[in-house]
């Protein structure tokens, strides 16, 4: 069972949650008001993939999943934390529930109910003490090096769809691996290299380009062929991202200096996009290095 939702959490300061198994090193998009405009900053906080208050079982983006992730195979992140040998480049789609260490009897009873055919996600909603219960215990796509050792070992050795148990410092877990895929690609591309790709007549048909700047910025300077998805309007387009874009196509992301685009590129990676390229330095670098007719601002 998948509970799809989308949210850009506002994080005031890093805070360690009571169940921090996900060792979060990925950025959280933080929209904070300033005197002139909203400032987008990157906060590295211990958090889990689905809710801003969800514990850190894994290192992942702190965004709720927008799509049904099992249908989106993908390959390698440049910011990869893979540590395994045969498991390098392998990602798992995991859901789980968590009970306190002293509640092992409850765990055994829940195991019996799973064996009798009850859905782990339904049991997570009712019994889990992890905030991921709001998402049916869904942790999303994870890879080696993103989890505490006990959880990681159990997940990467679990047969597909079989519910297994493990104990961590946070309590007892029942976890289930729903699917697996190759790790996705997330890379920077230099403006000159992107310009070279634009010379291919089939490029814009075979790939997709998005500009995450605000409309007033696009009016000042723009590149043809880009779909404008302003980051400050994330709430309107985020939940529909897989209807607006094809996760299987190469995706190029642009902003002013390459920071907002990198944040969005990393988020797209969590949503199952196969290959994502961040245009390094943004349109400012493109104007300086490739096309001086484009205004800088």
Image: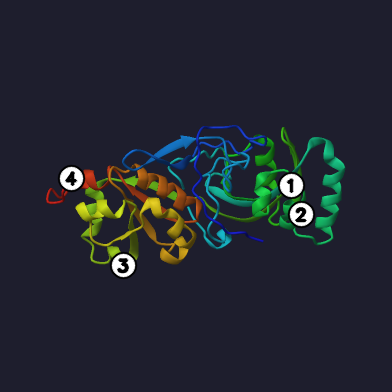
Characterize the local packing of mark 2: few (<14), some (14-19) or many (20 or more) Cα atoms within 10 angstroms: some
Q: Nearer the viewer, mark 1 or mark 3?
A: 1
Q: Can residue 25 be seen in this view?
A: yes
- Residue under label 1: 128
Q: Is mark 4 on a helix, strand or loop?
A: loop
**On the image, which quarter does residue 248 sit in?**
bottom left
4 and 1 marks in contact (CB < 8 Å):
no
- Distance (Cα) linking label 3 and label 4: 28 Å
183 with respect to 123 (left or right): left
Characterize the local packing of mark 3: few (<14), some (14-19) or many (20 or more) Cα atoms within 10 angstroms: few
Q: How many marks?
A: 4
Considering the image in quadrants, where does the C terminus appear? top left
Characterize the local packing of mark 1: few (<14), some (14-19) or many (20 or more) Cα atoms within 10 angstroms: many
1 and 2 marks in contact (CB < 8 Å):
yes
Mark positioned earlier in the residue sequence (1 or 2): 2
3 and 4 marks in contact (CB < 8 Å):
no
- Residue under label 3: 205
- Residue under label 2: 123
- Residue under label 4: 296
Most foreground residue, 25 or 88: 25
């Amino acid at each position: 069972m998948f509970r799809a939702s989308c949210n850009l959490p506002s994080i005031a300061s890093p805070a360690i949650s009571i169940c921090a198994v996900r060792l979060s090193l990925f950025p959280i998009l933080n929209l904070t008001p300033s005197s002139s405009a909203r400032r987008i900053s990157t906060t590295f906080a211990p958090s889990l993939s689905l809710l801003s208050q969800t514990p850190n079982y894994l290192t992942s983006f702190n965004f709720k999943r927008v799509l049904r992730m099992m249908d989106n195979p993908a390959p390698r992140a440049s910011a990869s934390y893979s540590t395994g040998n045969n498991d390098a480049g392998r990602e798992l789609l995991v859901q789980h529930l968590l009970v306190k260490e002293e509640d092992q009897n409850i765990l055994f009873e829940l195991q019996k109910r799973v064996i009798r055919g009850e859905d782990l996600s339904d049991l997570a909603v009712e019994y889990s003490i992890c905030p991921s219960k709001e998402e049916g215990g869904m942790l999303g796509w994870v890879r080696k090096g993103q989890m505490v050792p006990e959880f990681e070992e159990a997940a990467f050795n679990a047969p597909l769809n079989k519910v297994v148990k493990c104990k961590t410092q946070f309590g007892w877990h029942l976890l289930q691996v729903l699917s697996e895929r190759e790790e996705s690609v997330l890379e920077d591309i230099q403006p000159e290299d992107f310009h070279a790709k634009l010379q291919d007549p089939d490029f814009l048909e075979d790939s997709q380009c998005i500009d995450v700047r605000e409309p007033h910025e696009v009016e000042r300077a723009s590149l043809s062929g880009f779909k404008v998805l302003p980051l400050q309007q994330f709430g309107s387009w985020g939940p529909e991202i897989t209807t607006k874009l094809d996760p299987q196509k190469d995706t190029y992301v642009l902003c002013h200096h390459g920071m907002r685009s990198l944040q969005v590129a990393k988020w797209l990676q969590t949503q199952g996009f196969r290959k994502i390229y961040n245009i390094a330095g943004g349109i400012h670098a493109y104007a300086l290095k490739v096309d001086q007719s484009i205004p800088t601002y």
